[in-house]
Image (cartoon, rainbow, N blue to C red):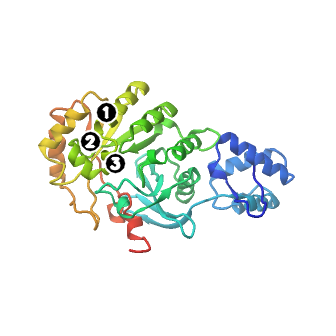
Amino acid sequence: MPNNDAGRKPTELLQLLGDEFIETASSAVEAAGEPSYRVDQLRRWLYERTPQSFKDMEGLPLSLREHLDKIFVLHPLDYDLEQVSEDGTRKFLWKQGREGGRIESVLIPDGDRTTYCISTQSGCPVKCTFCATGYGGFSGNLSAAEIIDQVVQIRSLSQQAPTNLVFMGMGEPLLNFDDLLRSLSILTDPRQLGIGARRITVSTVGIPERIRQLSQAFPQVKLALSIHAADPALRDELVPLNLKYPLDAVLEAVREHCANTGKRVTFEYVILPGVNDSPEAANALTKKVRGIPASINLIGFNPFEEAPYTKPELRSMIAFRDSIQRNYPGDVTIRRSRGEDIQGACGQLSLKNSPTS
């Protein structure tokens, strides 16, 4: 319950599940001497109109707004900067207070679709060798409030509500599992953000037990698995977490996910020229994922200074796709690169704007 006792940390409203929010807001409204219908007004302001501050909540009495501002935190993230690409992609950089890490989010418009790409950690401990996020170090997990605040603030700043939401930003979502589940509850609760679970995708490099638990908790949420190599030794090099959770064990959990949910998965594969794009690599991939209802999404590496890889040519990506399709019955697509002119790949903007860069 909210209070403003000295030394007590203010409550972060965006951290609260639906019932928790109703209880907490009701107590605050009652303490301010306001009628109970103010709770629903506050709810609609918070989740539907996304104000930048309590002062913006017109229609609520000034005394109530001042009271709420004393006992609650509205936005745990501080807006830092935004970059807009020629293709309409918008990348946002946030700060976790004065001493906190930097966090990236991306808005990707595509016709009648608007996708938000959301982060779950500040930096990433997995340290995939082709991902800029890992080169920037790891500052810690995000709270559910910080995860939700990305969605809320992007919607407020862009005035474009999301049609789809992907957990493909900074960090490994399944290594911040409790806050991931809490944020999914808030995102999908019709009293809160009300985003359909079928429109949400969680991407992971693969933690078998967490994949099973996610399938049980949110069977309608889509799953994407970042493979990047089927050869165990090469995947150990590219995705160091493979040393702890080998791909075969991960794929067994993915098979269970598909069987239990009836849903297909997406396999993500970043193409690194001369490293993982040979015909042999294509054959190894098709053998490894055979029998799993899935599509394969090929992604061209987006270069940054710290990484020892180059950008693939489109013709080489097409050749790799064709090699896969000779032995794979599912869909194989080449993802169109977005936001290259604004460091659109995960971690590039925060790496460029880090205090030590």
Which of the 4 quarters of the picture holds residue 66? bottom right
- Measure how far apart labels 3 and 2 are at the Cα level: 26 Å
Pointer 2 local density, CA inside 10 Å: few below 14, some 14–19, many at least 20 = some
Residue 294 shows which numbered tag? 1
Residue sticking out furthest to the bottom? 356
Residue sticking out furthest to the left? 279
- Measure how far apart labels 3 and 1 are at the Cα level: 22 Å
Label 1 sits on a secondary structure element that is strand
Amino acid at dot 1: Ala
Residue 93 shows which numbered tag? none
- Is the residue 288 above or below the residue 6 in the image? above
Query: Is label 3 or label 1 in front?
Result: 3
Residue for badge 3? 241
> In terms of depth relative to the viewer, which is nearer, 17 or 154?
17
Q: Residue at x 56, y 53 (%)?
A: 143
Which of the 4 quarters of the picture holds residue 266? top left
- Examine the rendering and report whether any part of residue 275 can be seen: yes
